[in-house]
Image (cartoon, grey):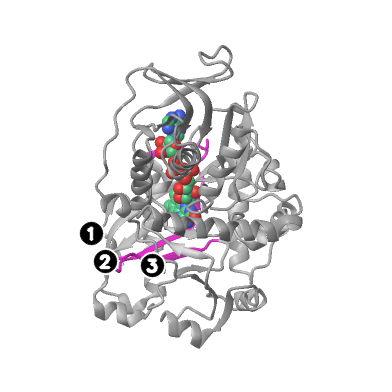
Amino acid sequence: MLRALAPSARGSFWLDDVTAHAHPVLDADVSCDLAVVGGGYTGLWTALLAKEAEPDARVVLIEARTVGWAASGRNGGFCEASLTHGEDNGRSRFADEYDQLERLGIQNLDEIEATVAKLALDCDFERNGAIDVATEQHQVEWLRDAAGAAGTRFLDADAVRAQIASPTYLAGLLHSHDSALVHPGKLALELARACTDAGVEIFEHTRVAALDASAPTLTDGVDVRTADGPIVHAHRVALGTNVFPSLLKRNRLATVPVYDYVLMTEPLSEAQLASIGWSGRQGIGDCANQFHYYRLSADNRILFGGYDAIYHYGGRVRARYEERPATFERLTSHFFTTFPQLEDVTFTHRWAGAIDTCSRFCAFFGTARAGRIAYATGYTGLGVGATRFGAQVMLDLLAGEQTERTELKMVQSRPIPFPAEPLASIGIQATRWSLDRADHNAGKRNLILKTLDAFGLGFDS
Ligand SMILES: Cc1cc2nc3c(=O)[nH]c(=O)nc-3n(C[C@H](O)[C@H](O)[C@H](O)COP(=O)(O)OP(=O)(O)OC[C@H]3O[C@@H](n4cnc5c(N)ncnc54)[C@H](O)[C@@H]3O)c2cc1C
């Protein structure tokens, strides 16, 4: 097992697999119609959609490091329609509007697919669907109950193993149209390319330190102050800063960083690939609370991630949290349990990323400083597709427009914040322990989980 992990290098395969185009550092004051903070998917979609809507607007995007270096360049690449972190979570929180959210989510995924085609975004987009797999007996009934929803099909043990040969599978639920796969690093860089083609000015290695709306240079605007001095005088500001310390005090306790870990194999040989089948190339996730997700890349590597979701006391984003030998060894062991026929395969990359977890498990939105600043964050590990929707919401809010999106309860409400330390840490560790117990006890939820469920609270990656 350790033999397989030994050759792996630390760092995202997706970022290793691309050649980034460098953008300049902001070295002088600028004025613009829209300043976007953050060069992940949220910021990039916001800038691109703003330019599409108003080609003459001056749009400036400011990124503290490099485009796509954070979650957007490290994720599993599951581009899902769900805006609510799955149907159960969505229905339990937004029962009255869930069908509408589902429709808007499919529309969002369709529009991502159309944009990829229209702008020729080279990002290995494959709309292959996904399979939820049951690896414990109690999960089989969950999948049987969930089957019947539009675009889903129950697969018994033989049927699911005929798709992907794993001895651990007891059943599956095939989702045929609400999920795609992308190369996350390519998607980020291609969105940046589309932004610059559309006239967006991107600045890298430029950290925003403060937003000042008290005496702005532009009437009714915001002075976006960078750490190194230059100021962006903006009419409106969109924040796509995800899990990093919010520039708005009100959002500081709304999300916590939860570390998620990922392995990438070497490309499989034809014989190795044949031994597992997987000709449908669907994204796979198991049904446990502490779940694994895995998929094929375009060059037939397997990305295998999830299970451990680690919160560190103090809730900070730190590079040193990305190395966690015990977690990588556990993932390696789970990989070979899932695919024992791949015993010769080795891993080339191992990495981790911080997930912007909020207590309702799906994004929240809002404005500050009399509607001049908008934010979208809290995707809780399902933002590859949903960030485009978040970008649209921010642009609606900044325009002061009433749209179908801004009327949603999901858009108008906010999650309950996490408590300050030490309570955050105590609560999150107790919840993790309870979720692990539920996974090993036929899914039965203990008092802690039932109480959190009753208050609509929780913790997830
Ligand atoms: C390991 C892992 C696996 C995941 N797998 C999936 C998956 O398969 N499917 C899925 O849907 N989601 C997945 N996610 C979640 C998904 O990656 C995120 O929801 C999404 O990338 C969020 O995009 P973003 O632009 O909001 O944030 P980010 O990509 O984190 O970008 C935020 C950017 O803001 C910049 N920034 C922050 N503060 C400042 C500042 N003050 N000044 C300037 N710049 C600033 C940062 O440098 C960063 O580049 C995963 C996440 C991780 C970590």
Mark number displayed over residue 399? none
Q: Nearer the viewer, mark 3 or mark 2?
A: 2
Taking the image as shown, residue 86 lies to the left or right of residue 266, namely right
Can see residue 415? no
Q: Which residue is mark 2?
A: 346
Residue 28: in magenta span: no
Single out the mark in the foreground, 3 or 1: 1
In primary-sequence order, the first of circles 2 and 1 is: 1
Question: Which numbered disc covers residue 7?
Answer: 1
Q: Residues within 10 Å of mark 2 (few under 14, many from 20)?
A: many
Compare residues 207 and 313 and report the one nearer the observer.
207
Q: Nearer the viewer, residue 179 or 379?
A: 179
User: Which residue carries the number 3 mark?
Assistant: 333
Type of amino acid at the residue the image marks with label 2: Thr
Which structural element holds mark 1? loop
Residue positioned 44% across, 67% down in the render: 127
Residue 275 in which image quadrant: bottom left
131 with respect to 364 (left or right) = left
- For residue 10, above or below residue 195: below
Residue 281 spot, x, y in % from top left: 40, 72
Image x and y of residue 131, in percent: 50, 72
Magenta span of residues: 290-319
Disc 1 packing (10 Å; few <14; some 14–19; many ≥20): some
Mark 2 and mark 1 residues within 8 Å of each other at the beta carbon: yes
Q: Between 448 and 460, which is closer to the camera in this rendering?
A: 460
Question: Which residue type does callout 1 highlight?
Answer: Pro
Q: Report the Cα–Cα distance between label 2 and label 1.
A: 7 Å
